[in-house]
Amino acid sequence: MVKEDWILEGDFNAIMDDAEKVGGRRELRVHMKELREVLEELALVDIKTARGWFTWVNNRDGNDLVKERLDRFVMTTNAVSIFPFIETNVIRQTKSDHDAVMLDTLGRKPKEKQKDPRLFFKFDAC
């Protein structure tokens, strides 16, 4: 278990579940389980992306196209309280098969109170 607060990024060359892959052969369940076990053992959590999802594409056409989420940021569970609004965004790269993943430690705070859209209605008696 990692006791310090860490944020790590990289090409993990593995997916965590079937939702992280489109096309191609199915990934072996044992590989997905191994990645999840390593993250759990080190008390690391995956930072989901706010925009974009797949970070690698094989740049083929039609049925040969494969997309996977291989690149990701992970952080220690302790660091979640330090960066409660952290988010990542996938930025498409045209000259590479891997997209860039940008980390925003400030993120977007959720709006405290959503205003009722009916309050914006204006009526003018003419």
Image (cartoon, grey):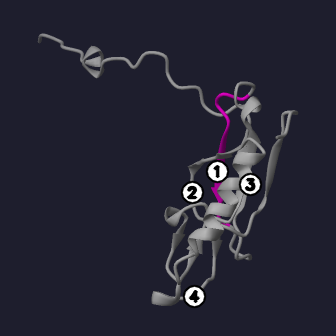
Q: Which residue is label 1 attached to? A: 89
- The amino acid type of the residue labelled 4 equals Arg
Which numbered mark, 3 or 2, is in the foreground of this view? 3
Q: Which residue is label 3 attached to? A: 38
Q: Secondary structure at mark 3?
A: helix
- How far separated are the C-alphas under marks 1 and 4? 23 Å
Which numbered mark, 4 or 3, is in the foreground of this view? 3
Q: Mark 2 or mark 1: name the one nearer the start of the chain.
A: 2
- How far separated are the C-alphas under marks 3 and 2? 25 Å
Q: Which residue is label 4 attached to? A: 60
- How far separated are the C-alphas under marks 2 and 4? 19 Å
31 inside magenta stretch: no
Q: Quadrant of residue 57?
A: bottom right
89 inside magenta stretch: yes
Q: Is residue 115 left or right of residue 56?
A: left
Q: x and y percent of residue 32 in the render?
A: 62, 65
Dots 2, 4 in contact, CB < 8 A: no
- How far separated are the C-alphas under marks 2 and 1? 6 Å
Which numbered mark, 3 or 1, is in the foreground of this view? 3
Q: Which residue is label 2 attached to? A: 52
Pointer 1: residues within 10 angstroms few (<14), some, or many (20+)? some
- The amino acid type of the residue labelled 3 equals Val
Dots 2, 1 in contact, CB < 8 A: yes
Q: Is residue 75 above or below residue 5?
A: below
Q: Is residue 82 above or below residue 123?
A: below
- Residue range in magenta is 83-92
- How far separated are the C-alphas under marks 4 and 3? 32 Å
Q: Nearer the viewer, residue 80 or 59?
A: 80
